[in-house]
Image (cartoon, rainbow, N blue to C red):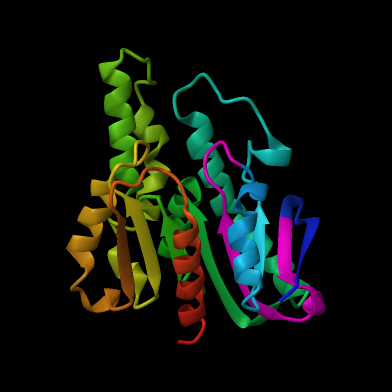
């Protein structure tokens, strides 16, 4: 199927809209797909094309501080990283509203997904938005509080200054931590994939979460795949797996 890539802004957010070429203004099942840290929307295009070829509309936004919105990383440790995620969370409602006003989402069928930082965004959105049908977290963590603590420990070990009220400043994260609120999964399909040799986000964070919730009544549509000896990189096989996941998700 021929697909079209449209560069545009919705609600002031620069993004790419990818869809079957003959269905530009026709409502479609829609996926908002988020890129990773220090990446940009163009780098999820291969995945987006695969999804659009299956008759989905994909929205790939630039996160704050990235792509067309590039800003230098703050010298305050992890400030820009968490600010970028929080920006995704703030802007989700505006993206959804803009898409609905343009009648681009078919019957409210909306899912999310993302890579690394985008995977974290996905899990955090699922804690708050019951209207999202499900999502794919690729190389992200569903436990941002644990990740935050690891970053703080690393800073302390390396004598990097953090504000004394660091954890108070970051207290907004806990309500969005899927590992702290796993009941919010509420039977929705979620795909987790993580490589055992991931050097950026610890494989154990995702594996431990899955082991904790896999037999819970609310997690009956969770799937977890391990990339043996894989690092922090998306391979073609993972893109195919992700595409198949969304096909099944929208068939539910």
Expressed as whole percent of the image width and height from the top left, the position of residue 133 reads: 48, 75
- In the image, what residue occupies the spot 62% across and 45% down? 63
| Count of marks, rendered view | 0
Q: Which residues are magenta?
A: 16-39
- In the image, what residue occupies the spot 57% across and 74% down? 110
Is 230 in the magenta? no
Expressed as whole percent of the image width and height from the top left, the position of residue 214 reads: 22, 69
- In the image, what residue occupies the spot 72% across and 56% down? 16
Q: In which quadrant of the rendered view does residue 155 lie? A: top left
Q: Is residue 83 left or right of residue 225?
A: right
Residue 142 visible in the snapshot: no
Q: In which quadrant of the rendered view does residue 185 lie? A: bottom left
- In the image, what residue occupies the spot 38% across and 41% down? 171
Instruction: Name the quarter where the C terminus is drawn.
Output: bottom left
Residue 233 visible in the snapshot: yes
- Front residue of 122 and 56: 56
The answer to whether 85 is drawn above or below residue 183 in the figure is: above
The answer to whether 6 is drawn above or below residue 218 in the figure is: above
Q: Is residue 42 left or right of residue 125?
A: right
Expressed as whole percent of the image width and height from the top left, the position of residue 223 reads: 32, 69
Toward the top, the furthest residue is 159
Q: Is residue 76 left or right of residue 6?
A: left
Expressed as whole percent of the image width and height from the top left, the position of residue 21 reads: 79, 73
Instruction: Name the quarter where the N terminus is drawn.
Output: bottom right
């Amino acid at each position: 199927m021929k697909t079209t890539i449209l560069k545009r802004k919705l609600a002031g957010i620069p993004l790419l809209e990818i869809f079957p070429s003959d269905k530009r203004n026709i409502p479609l099942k829609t996926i908002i797909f988020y890129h990773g840290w220090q990446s940009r929307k163009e780098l999820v295009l291969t995945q987006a094309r695969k999804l659009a070829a299956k008759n989905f509309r994909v929205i790939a936004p630039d996160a704050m501080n990235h792509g067309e919105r590039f800003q230098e990383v703050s010298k305050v440790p992890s400030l820009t990283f968490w600010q970028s995620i929080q920006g995704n969370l703030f802007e989700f409602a505006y993206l959804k509203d803009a898409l609905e006003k343009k009648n681009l989402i078919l019957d409210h069928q909306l899912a999310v997904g993302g890579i690394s930082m985008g995977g974290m965004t996905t899990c955090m959105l699922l804690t708050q938005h019951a209207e999202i049908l499900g999502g794919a977290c690729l190389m992200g963590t569903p436990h941002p509080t644990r990740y935050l603590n690891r970053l703080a420990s690393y800073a302390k070990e390396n004598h990097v200054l953090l504000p004394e009220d660091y954890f108070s400043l970051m207290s907004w994260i806990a309500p969005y931590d899927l590992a702290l609120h796993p009941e919010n999964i509420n039977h929705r399909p979620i795909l987790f994939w993580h490589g055992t040799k991931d050097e950026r986000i610890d494989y154990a964070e995702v594996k431990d979460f899955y082991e904790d919730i896999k037999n819970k009544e609310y997690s009956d549509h969770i799937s977890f795949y391990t990339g043996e000896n894989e690092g922090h990189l998306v391979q073609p096989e993972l893109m195919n797996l992700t595409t198949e996941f969304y096909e099944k998700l929208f068939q539910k």
